Each structure stands twice: as C-alpha cells, then as structure tokens.
Amino acid sequence: MLCGLDLMRVHLMAARLQNALAVATLSASVNLTLYPTLQGSDFDAWKANAYNYLMSNVPDDYVGGVDPKGFQATVTGSLGTGQTVSVQVNANVPIWSAGLLPILTDTVTASNSAVCRNETNLELVMALDNTGSMGSSATGNGGASKIQGLRDAASTLVTLMLGDGSTPPAGNAVIGLVPFTSTVNVKSIASSSNWFGTMPSYNMNGVVESAWSGCTVEPRLTNGKPDEQNGVLDIQTYKPSDKLFKKYYYNAPPSGMQVQTCPSGSWQNCASNLSEPATTINSVPFKITSNGKPNPNGEPGNIYAQGQYSGLTRVWVQRSDDNNSTYTQNNNCISQKVVFLSSDQSVLNTAIKALRSKG
C-alpha cells in the first residue's frame, strides 16, 4: 500500500512540476525583452524571474519540495534567427515506504523549451470577456477595472506582434478578436459564411429577420431531435460543415410569458401578493420594468433552456416602482462584433478600446 501511495505521489509531483514549468518557460521567453544583454546581473535576474514563475504554481508543501539547486535555465541563439529557452528543475519526493526500500527520497525531473522569434506567420485569436463582472476592480480594493486591464493587455499584445507602427511588422502575423458575454456577435463576418444558417423556428411572433443584430445559437440537439422541436436543448458534438449555426433572438415562450408585478420595493411573495393582475406576453418587443428579472423566487417547473424559444423563463416578475424598459428580439446580444483575422492595428485597437463590461 505504501509503495502504491508513493507511486501516486511521484506521479502527482511530476504532473504538477511539468505544468508549472511550462508556464515558467513561456513567461521566461516573454521576459527576454526585459533583459537585453542576458549577461551578468541581467542573466541572474532573468533566471530568478523564471524560478519565481515556477514556484508560484508549485506550493512549498506540495508532496515534496523543489530543489533550488536543481533549477537550470539557459538561452541559446539570437533574436534574428530564434532564441531557444531551455528550463529544467528537480524535485524531491519523500518515500513513505523507505523502511522497505533502500532509498529515502525519489527525484522527479521536468524539462521544457520554447523558441522565440521576431518574425512569425502566427494566426492568433483573442477571446475577450465582456461580462458584467469585468467592470469590478481588478484588485478588489478600487482602482482600475478588470475590463481596463483587459483592454491594456490586448493592445500590448497587438503591439508586440505587429510592431509599434514605426517600422513595418516582420512576418505575416494576423490577429482576430472575439468579445463575448453569454453571446458572440458575428455579424461582421456572417454574410459570406457557409457555416451560418437562418433564423431558428422557435416562437417567431414579432421577430423580424432583417432586424437581426448578429448573435448566434450553436447547433443543438433536443432530446435527440432537431432543435426546433420541443424538449431540452443539449450541447451536441458537431463539425461546422455538418451543422449550421443559427441566428439568435430573445423571445417569449410559445404559450406566452407571464409577467407578475410585485408591490413597490419588494420581490418577496410576489406570485401570491400581486399589486396588479398578472399579464401574458406572447411576442417581442415587450415592456417590463428596468429591475424586472426572470424567476427570482424560483418558478416551479422552471423551463430554462427548454421548449421552443430562446428566452429565459415562462415567469418574469417586476416591481411596480420602476420605469418601463423595452425588450427586443436582440436583448442579451453583445454589441461588440467579432473582428476577423487582421494585421491592421488601427482596426484592432479601435475594437479593443470599444470593449465594455455589460452582459
């Protein structure tokens, strides 16, 4: 049993060490630009930085311990032809079955390498989080927001790949952007795409196809049936050439959405304590209050992601002390559109600056 546990612990350390070393190798490669000479104190600082990246992903008390003397990092080659960063580390795992075996510890070794070049034909796509939480402080204590950090980091990466504009960029690197919330807006590239289909045939009351704003619905199965039929919409494994994406819209269920108005200032017991009779909405657009929400108190038999509609619920509650807001077929569709692969820094940076935490 002890031997079996020792074997498991050695494998755990090996896996953790290799993953942490991969991060350290990539980070050390990026940091080459901060230490141009890579000699003397420059090299020592670069190596120490790489070691800190490694240790940030391996807790001090994890299984055994990393041997600082067993950490090696080297750089060979030149920036023009390519620099190879090689990193290796050893860790010692105490052997619980040492009383049965002639060893006290087992040494685990991990190694990794990466090649850095200043010319590339890289195609990079950044999936960028635009959800509401990105509007909060990055530190949790005030200061710059997460979305601001995202914009700054994305712009920095564009500059690193395509140059600062003072000289033509080397290579043929291109970058794409995919802002997302609960939806992705592909209207900028959908018109000529053979992976893209028509509107799904959910409840089409009030829906105008020409007013579609660009968000999509993935191909799904509904209890093994096409997604137009009733049932649970299950995620499906598919090839884009086999199953077409469809146009997203927000709508009411086919049987209508019940809107219950609560007394001013409270959601509590709304269904049994209405300030006015419940109304039924059968189509878009429709008006509810700005602080209305789907099913906040728990709707019996909630049908989220079920049935022939792409809205949220059959029951929506609202307070009587709020102003009306209009919900359209494009509600919850993110306004920031996908940017297809491009080397135009102006186009990319304009799109990055437009990112907002909303949704």
Image (cartoon, rainbow, N blue to C red):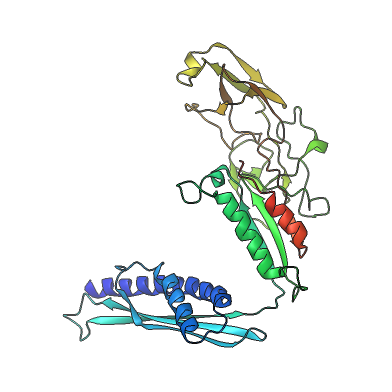
Residue at far left of view: 99
Quadrant for the N terminus in the image:
bottom left
Apparent side of residue 338 relative to residue 46 in the rendered image (left or right): right
Q: Is residue 57 above or below residue 229?
A: below
Q: Quadrant of residue 275?
A: top right
Residue at far bottom of view: 77
Residues 140 and 81: in front is: 140
Apparent side of residue 33 relative to residue 250 in the rendered image (left or right): left
Q: Quadrant of residue 158?
A: bottom right
The residue lying at 57 percent from left, 81 percent from top is 36
Q: Is residue 257 above or below residue 49?
A: above
Q: Is residue 30 above or below residue 189?
A: below
The residue lying at 59 percent from left, 55 percent from top is 150
Q: Is residue 287 above or below residue 139?
A: above
* Residue 51 at x, y percent in the picture: 42, 75
The residue lying at 60 percent from left, 37 percent from top is 231
Residues 40 and 126: in front is: 40
Residue at far top of view: 276
Q: How many marks?
A: 0
Quadrant for the C terminus in the image:
top right
* Residue 109 at x, y percent in the picture: 39, 81
Residue 23 in view, yes or no = yes
* Residue 299 at x, y percent in the picture: 50, 26
Residue 242 in view, yes or no = no
Apparent side of residue 56 relative to residue 352 in the rendered image (left or right): left
* Residue 73 at x, y percent in the picture: 46, 83
